[in-house]
Image: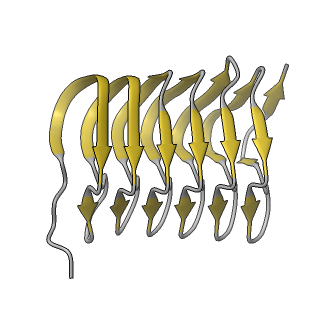
Amino acid sequence: ALPICQLFDGSGSTLTFRDLTLRNGYNPDGSGGAVYAYSMTLVRVRATDNSAGVNGGAFWAFNGATITDSRFTDNRAGQDGGAIYAFVGSVSIGNSSFERNQAGSEGGAVYCYDGSIAATDGSSFVANGAATHGGALFSYLGSGISLADAVFTDNSAGSQGGAVGSIYPVTAV
């Protein structure tokens, strides 16, 4: 078995990562395979092959995340948010790609429990999957999901929302 190797634990901290690659983070019994933080800003970050036994295969944020010019591939979560899980707040995604991320329940790439998700500026979601809802994106509570110039290809969910799932409205522009 692999040792527990969460790369960063920023509990209570707001973290900013720029021009960084995070690979093979592993948290089998918790959340945030690579990073666990209060909130985060990711700019030109690459996250690959990270996994968490619970939520947020690569990243877990209590109060949202801002993601720009980043790439997330082959991350896995046992429950929600194959690449990213945000508990509250908003997740803003610009010009970023999510490929082959997997969640054991909801939000194959991104899951937001109580907030919103905005994906814009050519962000792409390719071949992500969730066992139940929201193959690429899932928002449970809050104000839903807003999409503008985002591309979804070959995402899948076992029950509903092959690409996008939300309890609240989804707005596509």
User: In x, y percent, where is residue 28?
Assistant: 27, 70
The mark tally for this picture is 0
Q: Is residue 63 left or right of residue 144?
A: left
Examine the image and state in which quarter residue 98 appears: top right
The quarter in which the N terminus is drawn is bottom left
Q: Residue 66: give x, y in percent of width and height.
A: 45, 22
Task: Give the side of residue 166 with respect to residue 55, left or right.
Answer: right
Lateral position of residue 58 relative to residue 35, left or right: right
> Which residue is pictured at 68% across the width and 17% down the height?
121
Assign the C terminus to one quadrant of the image: top right
* Picture quadrant where residue 101 is located: bottom right
In this view, the residue in front, 125 or 169, is 125
Q: Where is residue 30 in the image (x, y as percent from the top left)?
A: 27, 63
142 vs 76, nearest the viewer:
76
Residue that lies at the very extreme toward the right in this rendered image: 173
Q: In which quarter of the image is residue 124?
A: top right
Depicted 60 relative to depicted 162: above or below: above
Residue occupying image coordinates x 65% and y 61%: 129
